[in-house]
Structure formats: C-alpha cells, structure tokens
Image (cartoon, grey):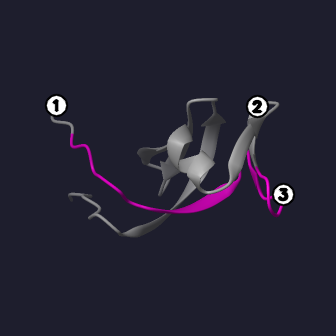
Amino acid sequence: LLFAPAKDMQLRGTVTECFESHVSLLVYNFFNASITADHLVEAGFMFEGGEWVNEDDSTLIAAEEHVNFTVEKNTRMCW
C-alpha cells in the first residue's frame, strides 16, 4: 500500500505539536505532515502561548485539534 498525496489534495490531520516555526500533524493516525509558519501567517494566524490563533475569527490551532489542509508538496522518503 502506497500513500502518495498529490498536490492540491485536501487532507485532515490531528495536531500533535505547535511550534513558532510550524505545526506538526498526524494524518490517518499514521503519516506525518507539517504546515510552516509562513503558510499559517499568510492564512491570518499568529503564534501565541504555544498555539496558533487566527486574528480574524479566533480559530485556534492547538494540540489534539483537527485541521483541514491542502497538500502543497509531497516529500518522499525512502528507507
């Protein structure tokens, strides 16, 4: 079984950790993904107290929250 999401594919992940540089997510309880701070800031979020908060509507991105996102690129790793 190969999981290779394509560019522009919509996915949903569970936030595992929030950092000032990025948000780490777990997709389908198996695959890791991340959203960089650049993309979060572009979407109106700012990092406050270990969480990302949307400046317009107070939407919160924090550990255990579910986030819908669009794949921009897929970095394939070979073992």
Report whether 23 appears left or right of 77. right
Report whether 54 appears left or right of 72. right
**Callout in the foreground (1, 3):** 3
- Residue 57: give x, y in percent of width and height: 82, 64
Please name the amino acid that badge 3 sits on. Answer: Ser
Which residue is at 47% across, 58% downward?
Answer: 28
SS type, badge 2: loop
Q: Which residues are magenta?
A: 54-76
SS type, badge 3: loop
Q: Closest to the observer: 65 or 48?
A: 48
Please name the amino acid that badge 1 sits on. Answer: Trp
Which residue is at 56% across, 30% downward?
Answer: 21
Q: Which residue is mark 3?
A: 58
Which residue is at 21% across, 37% downward?
Answer: 77
Number of the label disc, if any, that sits on residue 48: none
Q: Which residue is mark 1?
A: 79
